[in-house]
Amino acid sequence: MTTTLETPQVLTDSEVEEFWEQGYLLVRGVLSRDEAAYYRDLILDLVPRNLIIPEHWHAADGRIKPMVSADNQTWDTPELLPLWANEKLYHVAAQLLRSPRLRSFDGSLGVTLRNDVHRDSALSQTLHIDASVPRDVDNFLLTLEEVQLGGCFYFNDVLPEGGGIHVVPGGHRIVAEEAKAHPQGRHLHDDWKRITHLKSVEVTGEAGDFALLHHLMPHGASHNRHSTPRVAQFLRYVREDHPHGAGKRPATAYNERQLAAVGPLGRKLLGVDPW
């Protein structure tokens, strides 16, 4: 017997319509300002005080991406893991994906410092998509089960030209149409990692907001022209029945401290406990 799990409907009908039409949505107040400040400081404390940036970290045009190791971007410490199980964000994802049985993953971090160069460009990163669709698959399924909801927490107020994420309004539908028209649509534009023919806008927001994107949304990073660093954490949600198995990790990947930090909801989202 299958148990039906009910979750609160956090988004209004107009917000749901906006997300599916535009491909992105700023979810306001996912964290309080105090909570946002707490996580901002945790992440900034990872940056060495002597500013000797580890060689395995990524850094470009003011963007610093702390890395656990050269091939691991996932920061799943007990201090940061509660973000993966944020109840409001989980309910938003469950509402949009029409299923409460989800997985959360990614957990990468970003710090964008002031950068005064490249004044002729708003972007410090080429538009791309993070599809979680294997590169040996020739096209997208374009089903609800395949949809991935990704995005980032803003831990500080992000003003225009403040390092906010750039998106293409309606871009997820453009990607879908271009891909459908080609037998190997998954592989267009260098596997959709170099999208140069679309124009983007910056998503600004306040500390505690979450910029939520459809997995086919072209996006990129903005230059930060302000003195305040933009601090963010990236997170993704998928349905448990995601056709490509995105986000699956063995339950043994987490220790007791990590599991205690995420609580009962987090244990399910990490795949440790069954739904």
Image (cartoon, helix red, strand yellow):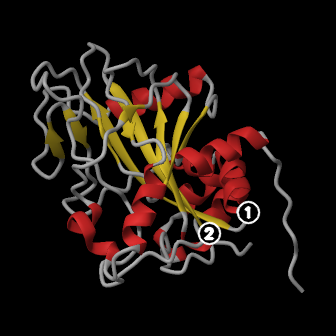
For the point 48% across and 69% down, the residue is 247
Q: Which of marks 1 and 2 is nearer the N terminus?
A: 1
Query: In the rendering, at what x and y percent does residue 177 appear?
Result: 44, 65
89 or 57: nearer the eye? Answer: 89
Q: In which quadrant will I find the N terminus? A: bottom right
Based on the displayed image, in which of its 4 quarters is residue 223 positioned? top left
Based on the displayed image, in which of its 4 quarters is residue 164 positioned? top left
On the question of residue 71 being in view, the answer is yes
Query: In the rendering, at what x and y percent does residue 35 appear?
Result: 57, 27
253 or 101: nearer the eye? Answer: 101
Mark 2 = which residue? 144
Question: Looking at the image, do the residues carrying marks 1 and 2 touch, with CB atoms under 8 Å apart?
Answer: yes
What number is the disc on residue 98?
1
Amino acid type of disc 1?
Arg
Circle 2 — which element?
Answer: helix
For the point 58% across and 73% down, the residue is 143
Query: In the rendering, at what x and y percent does residue 209 appear?
Result: 56, 31
Counting other residues with Cα less than 10 Å from the Cα at mark 1, is it few (<14), some (14-19), or many (20 or more)? Answer: some
Q: In which quadrant will I find the C terminus? A: bottom right
Circle 1 — which element?
Answer: loop
Based on the displayed image, in which of its 4 quarters is residue 221 positioned? top left
263 or 20: nearer the eye? Answer: 20
Query: In the rendering, at what x and y percent does residue 2 appear?
Result: 86, 81
For the point 32% across and 31% down, the residue is 45
24 or 230: nearer the eye? Answer: 24
Give the vertical position of 274 relative to 107 (above or below).
below
